[in-house]
Image (spheres, helix red, strand yellow):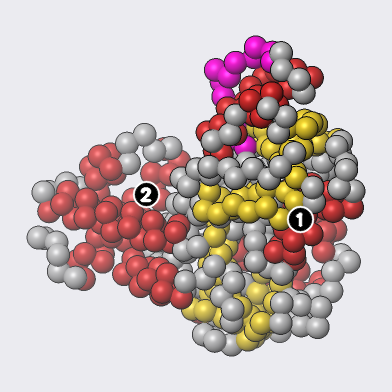
Amino acid sequence: MNNPPPLESVSVIFIHEQQIFAVQRQPYLLAFPGYHAFPGGKIDADESSTAFETEFLCEHNALRMRALQREIMEELGYDLEEGVKKGEVLSVSELAEALAPPFAPVRFRTWFYRVDLSRRINFKVDSGEFADSFWKTPKELLETFKTGKSLMVPPTRWVLEGLQKNHQANAFGDLSQNFAENKTVPCLEMLEGVPQYAVRSATLPPASRTNAFLLGDADAPKLLVDPSPNSAEEYQRLLNTIDHKKLDAIFLTHHHPDHHQFSNQLARQLKLPIILSEDTQQRLTLKNGDDYFEQVELRNVVENEEVTRWHGSAVRVYEIPGHDAGHLGLAPDTLSWFIVGDLIQGIGTVVIPSPEGDMATYFKTLEKVIALNPEVIIPSHGIPMRTTHRLIETLKHRRERESQILKLSNSGKSKQEILEQLYEGLDPRLHLLALQNIEAHLVKLRKEEQLIK
């Protein structure tokens, strides 16, 4: 089956003297929540392709210019064409383009346009799209990333780095990254010091990969979190990718296959210990035999233990059961971020499986992490997200779903009938998983004596 062609989008870099206009996206947006970015957006299916006659704009692809004009008006309340006519726009250059990686759930090809201004415009920023906006130099914007204070997709950084080196640059060309997926595992770094390796894993659809994180300051232990290749070929690609890295230990968040597969073999081959919860160790041994961890040093950890450091801050273990009884998370003392594993999904929906899952415990864990209020949430499937918004929405959704299940069950509906009513249109491959969640809610309601029977 052929992959659909990438969606096309445009982005604008307004420049006045040494400063660039940038934005921070709202944390509730589905695409890149809370990220530092440039204004812009998708080229609509019905976008006009009528060429501009206006200076500068007429020199570029008409469809992309029309999209750029529309997006700037919608997001910033600024008429680009009028800006040219009034002499506020000094030049428009096609600065760069970048294609998102082939494994992205939604793939964009983005064109970046440089627009030089005669004065610094006080844009009327759409607060529905952007939580903040600022005029800063490329160096200042990059500093927020280097100190772990902002989320950025790689092309945004590359554009800023290019402009820092040459502020007059107006043509960087194609910045698309070649991931060489036949030889290595792709690596993305949206938060400085928390690179994620998108490992093909035996996970549940619609996800197909698990994030394996590499954590640790230069003078701290280096942890590889959840290496979980789904085949010997992917295992070799992972080895090729980390071959030059200095590793001190493997860390497992929990015992599900898409978080530990091949980790025992990797530990033996690289002579690394495995850090995990006692519950995870017991479940893996029970399922895979007493020899699963043969010749592997194991270290059981519990809440609050320090395992490495990030930007000088101790990174500690958090117990986050519910999806799995032995589930562990990681966060620095600054709570700049929190690796939540499968507490939420950036792609798809969390399943609460039996016997290791417990819906009541899952609710409590969501409440626990929300109360901690980390700045960035990092799931095992998908991309980092700023604020706890996604956790709050997940808890709200699960409570609403539970209320629906309670009502339907008490009206005499079977689990299958509840599935058919609440999950209409769900991919048939996910029906058994949805039934597991329905059962998990019913178990919780039964314990709370809310069910009539």
Work out whether residue 14 can be spotted. yes
Q: Is 143 placed above or below 30 here?
A: below
Q: Position of residue 70 (x, y in %)?
A: 58, 27
Q: Position of residue 305 (x, y in %)?
A: 59, 87
Q: Quadrant of the C terminus?
A: bottom left
Q: Quadrant of the N terminus?
A: top right
Identify the amino acid type marked 1. Thr
Q: Position of residue 54 (x, y in %)?
A: 71, 17
Identify the amino acid type marked 2. Ala
Name the disc covering residue 122, or none: none
Work out whether residue 113 can be spotted. no
**Magenta region, residue range:** 40-52
Q: Is residue 104 left or right of residue 404?
A: right
Is residue 267 part of the magenta span, yes or no? no
What is the crowding at mark 1: few (fewer than 14 residues within 10 Å), some, or many (at least 20)?
many
Q: Residue at x 76, y 55 (%)?
A: 137
Name the disc covering residue 434, or none: 2
Q: Position of residue 156 (x, y in %)?
A: 73, 48
- Residue identified by numbered label 1: 137
